[in-house]
Image: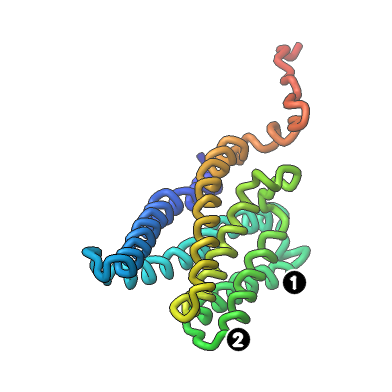
Amino acid sequence: MDLADFLGLVHPAIAVIFVFPLIGNVVNFAWQTRQRRLQSLNEGKSKIPPVVGKEHKQLGDWLTSAVVGLTLVGLAYPIGKNIIKKQLWNTANFQVIFIILMFVVTIASLVLLYQAKQKLWRGIFATLTGAGLIILGCQDGVYRLDNEWYWSHYYIGITAALLMIFSLAIVQDIYKSHRWRVIHTILNCLALLLFIGQGLTGTRDLLQIPLSWQEPYIYQCDYVNKTCPTPNTQAPK
């Protein structure tokens, strides 16, 4: 396995080792928080400690950072590989600078989103963070699987990341409005289903994306008819 292929494993490795266990913890604390709220309303008290709400909020913030960071890592690998392969710093240096700036702006916007208190600024920084992910995802080299967008690891992942960003932007409002709390719950249930889809599509893409030394042959295959050119096995005369 070449270095380029090893770097391609960084994104799924982070997802398996860090992000998915974090999702499980967030879901667990979310369930406990809701059960405590319902028990308090119906019985006046609950055996579930009140700290679960604080822990859910803290882990939820970490999860948003982890998902956005994981998305950026997943985008950085194919974009960087395409830049090196086509030597874009020689032929399109403005594009390379723009891509680097978009990574910086996206990360900075996420950091500022955590710091923002006013609703207007939270909306601005959330929009900038989401726009940065979308713009980077449109760059050459990203494995988007446009013809099967409904089952694409890229599109499902971007949608999940955008939902997490929006949830972070409204988290301060859920303590003031029941309507925002319901919206928060619905969006995160949808995000959970998308994360499950990510596990399935990510595994599939690891099988479909060839290793570097396999690319010249594999990309000659007809993916529609599921055929590949037959190698010439006849010995030279």
Q: Callout 1 environment at 10 Å: few (<14), some (14 to 19), or many (20+)?
A: few
The kind of residue on which mark 2 rests is Leu
Spot the residue most to the left. 47
Spot the residue most to the front. 42
Circle 1 sits in a helix, a strand or a loop, which is it?
helix
Across and down, in percent, residue 233 comes to 70, 15
The residue where tag 1 is placed is 94
Across and down, in percent, residue 26 comes to 38, 60
Across and down, in percent, residue 48 comes to 25, 64
Q: Looking at the picture, tell me which residue is in the foreground, 11 or 37.
A: 37
- Residue at point 60% right, 70% down? 103
Total number of numbered discs in the rendering: 2
Q: Callout 2 environment at 10 Å: few (<14), some (14 to 19), or many (20+)?
A: few
- Residue at point 21% right, 64% down? 47
The kind of residue on which mark 1 rests is Phe
Query: Which quadrant of the structure image shows residue 140?
Result: bottom right
Horizontal side of 61 relative to 139 (left or right) equals: left
The residue where tag 2 is placed is 120
- Residue at point 38% right, 62% down? 30
